[in-house]
């Protein structure tokens, strides 16, 4: 049973996370020839103060946060 683990700064919508799970699963299934129902995906979200970029918290390095698409 393949497991894909994604760690990212929080701020994505539920729809984006569902799309990510769907797309990662399909890609792994096609690439490795594994049945889709055998693939697992876990998303771990971290706050902007718990993620560092270049020695600074994400919240300081990228004060605008995660860029979300326009509706």
Image (tube, helix red, strand yellow):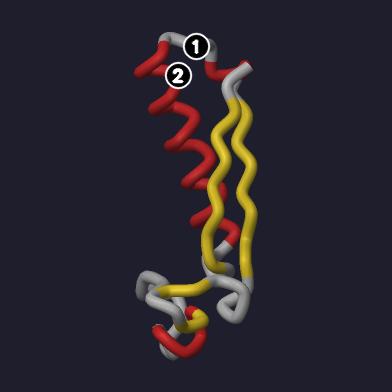
Q: How many marks?
A: 2
Q: Secondary structure at mark 2?
A: helix
Left/right of residue 13 with respect to residue 64 in the rendered view? right
Tell me if residue 6 comes above or below residue 14 in the rendering.
above
The answer to which image quadrant residue 46 occupies is bottom right
Expressed as whole percent of the image width and height from the top left, the position of residue 52 reads 49, 73
Q: Secondary structure at mark 1?
A: loop
The N terminus: image quadrant: top right
Tell me if residue 37 comes above or below residue 62 in the rendering.
above
Tell me if residue 30 comes above or below residue 48 in the rendering.
above
Query: Are the two marked residues, 2 and 1, in contact with CB atoms closer than 8 angstroms?
Result: yes
Q: Nearer the viewer, residue 49 or 42?
A: 49
Left/right of residue 12 with respect to residue 47 in the rendered view? left
What distance separates the C-alpha of mark 2 from that of mark 1? 5 Å
Which residue is drawn at the image coordinates 37% and 70% (left, top)?
A: 69
Tell me if residue 59 comes above or below residue 47 in the rendering.
below
Q: Nearer the viewer, residue 21 or 53?
A: 53
Circle on res. 29: 2
> Residue under circle 1?
34
């Amino acid at each position: 049973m393949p497991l894909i683990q994604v760690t990212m700064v929080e701020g994505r919508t539920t729809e984006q996370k569902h799309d990510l799970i769907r797309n990662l699963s399909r890609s792994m299934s096609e690439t490795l020839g594994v049945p889709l129902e055998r693939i697992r995906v876990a998303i771990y979200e971290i706050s902007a103060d718990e993620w560092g970029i270049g020695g600074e918290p994400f919240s300081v390095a990228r004060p605008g946060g995660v860029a979300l698409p326009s509706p």
